[in-house]
């Protein structure tokens, strides 16, 4: 039987995912508005969570930088690239949650008591499977119009995302999760907020994304 927390997660995800996709797919002013909302809410949660002024300022500056790099990622590469990296982060989180609940096993670190080695393994496996399916699906979809310059560029961009890069992005996402977990532990709180039923705060859901996506942009550029 699905527990109450999982029910809340599923219900809120049904609302969050389509709304988020609307703002991501419709770039320009829609996406900018989405990012402004994200920075404001995430900064509020960060400031509320931390006591020291210096840490508050550093966190806000990082959120601004990360948001700008995510914006550049969305506008410098195809939508497929952006969605694929986002997919890796989402399935990294899902893999960690599902495998950790299912297989349990030794704890990974005291920073986040719920994290297990089985969860880490699940994060890598699920994100890799999801990314490779996504990559194959869009590559096949574009082949009939291979003569199109736009389609050719999309395929070339997707080819940049190798298996090693997929696993590295997943690792970055997991590190981001641990970093936010560390600050939550310092503040002695379970969630960064309660804006998302079943998920906690916004930072609880994007902790991996705000580390993985900006660094992915830099890797793809350089």
Image (cartoon, rainbow, N blue to C red):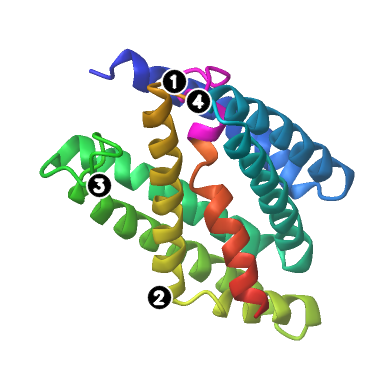
Q: Is residue 15 above or below residue 155?
A: above
Tell me the SS state at disc 1.
loop
Circle 4 residues within 10 Å: few <14, some 14–19, many ≥20: many
Q: Relative to the observer, which residue lies in front, 148 or 129?
A: 129
Q: Is residue 199 magenta?
A: yes
Measure how far apart labels 2 and 3 are at the Cα level: 19 Å
Circle 1 residues within 10 Å: few <14, some 14–19, many ≥20: some
Q: Relative to the observer, which residue lies in front, 218 or 86?
A: 218
The residue identified by callout 3 is 119
In front: label 4 or label 2 = 4
- Residue under the point 75% across and 32% down: 37
Tell me the SS state at disc 4.
loop
Quarter location, residue 149 = bottom right
Q: Relative to the observer, which residue lies in front, 4 or 39?
A: 39
Mark 1 vs 3, N-terminal side: 3
The residue identified by callout 1 is 198
Magenta-tinted stretch: 192-204
Measure how far apart labels 1 and 2 are at the Cα level: 32 Å
In front: label 4 or label 1 = 4
The residue identified by callout 2 is 164
């Amino acid at each position: 039987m699905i527990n109450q927390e999982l029910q809340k997660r599923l219900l809120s995800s049904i609302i969050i995912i389509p709304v988020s996709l609307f703002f991501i797919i419709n770039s320009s002013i829609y996406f900018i508005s989405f990012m402004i909302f994200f920075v404001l809410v995430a900064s509020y949660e960060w400031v509320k969570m931390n006591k020291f002024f210096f840490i508050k300022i550093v966190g806000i500056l990082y959120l601004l930088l990360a948001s700008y790099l995510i914006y550049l990622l969305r506008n410098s590469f195809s939508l497929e690239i952006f969605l694929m990296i986002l997919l890796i982060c989402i399935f990294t989180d899902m893999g960690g949650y599902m495998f950790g609940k299912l297989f349990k096993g030794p704890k990974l670190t005291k920073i986040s008591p719920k994290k297990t080695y089985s969860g880490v393994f699940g994060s890598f496996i699920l994100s890799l499977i999801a990314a490779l399916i996504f990559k194959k699906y869009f590559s096949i979809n574009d082949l009939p119009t291979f003569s199109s310059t736009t389609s050719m560029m999309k395929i070339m961009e997707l080819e940049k995302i190798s298996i090693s890069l997929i696993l590295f992005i997943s690792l970055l996402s997991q590190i981001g999760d641990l970093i936010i977990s560390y600050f939550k532990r310092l503040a002695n709180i379970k969630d960064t907020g309660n804006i998302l039923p079943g998920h906690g705060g916004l930072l609880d859901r994007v902790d991996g994304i705000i580390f993985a996506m900006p660094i992915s942009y830099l890797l793809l550029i350089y």
